[in-house]
Image (spheres, rainbow, N blue to C red):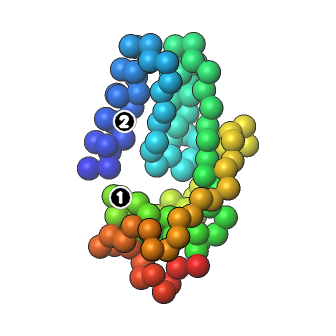
Amino acid sequence: KTRQAHDACLRNFTEALVRKEGLVIVDNTNSRFHEYSTYLALARAFCYKAMVIEMGCPSEAMARTFCTRSVHSPPWDVVRRMWSRWETDRAGLLLPPQLPPPSQLHTGPHSPKPESLL
């Protein structure tokens, strides 16, 4: 299921480049450079200016909070593994974490209990 989602994302991205869309944004779970380097190479091959924008996640506690915000309700162990192998792109734009009030956090079936956050 995850592989199919990643393949569909890359296909949609490539199709947008071929159509010469003015702005193309990839919002996907790319935690290491090799996972998104194809997107950068394709963008440059189609003469797009490419930029990596990363939401900072400085702690495991913050990763747990982000996990609760996901509309996909990923299991915490999957999110934790991704967080532990994260590679910050030094050439990218690093944004500070953005957190809504706790009352607006998404809670899915795999989300940690609110009392375990932060």
| Mark 2 vs mark 1: in front | 1
Crowd rating for badge 1 (residues with CA inside 10 Å; few <14, some 14–19, many 20+): few
Instruction: Give the secondary structure at mark 1.
Output: loop
Q: Nearer the viewer, residue 7 or 104?
A: 104
According to the picture, the residue beneath numbered tag 1 turns out to be: 71
Residue beneath disc 2: 9
Q: Position of residue 30 (x, y in %)?
A: 50, 46
Marks 2 and 1, how far apart in space?
17 Å
In the drawing, does residue 86 fall left or right of residue 69?
A: right
Relative to 34, does residue 103 appear above or below in the rendering?
Answer: below
Image quadrant in which you'd find residue 77: bottom left
For this rendering, which residue is in front, 111 or 1?
Answer: 111
- Residue at 61% over, 37% down: 52
Quadrant of the rendered image containing residue 40: top right
Element on which disc 2 rests: helix
N-term mark: 2 or 1: 2
Residues 50 and 77: in front is 50
In front: 30, or 57?
57
Q: Position of residue 18 (x, y in %)?
A: 40, 13
Q: Quadrant of the C terminus?
A: bottom right
Name the residue located 35 percent from the left edge and 28 percent from the top edge: 12
Within-10-Å neighbours for mark 2: few <14, some 14–19, many 20+:
some
Which residue is at the far right? 90
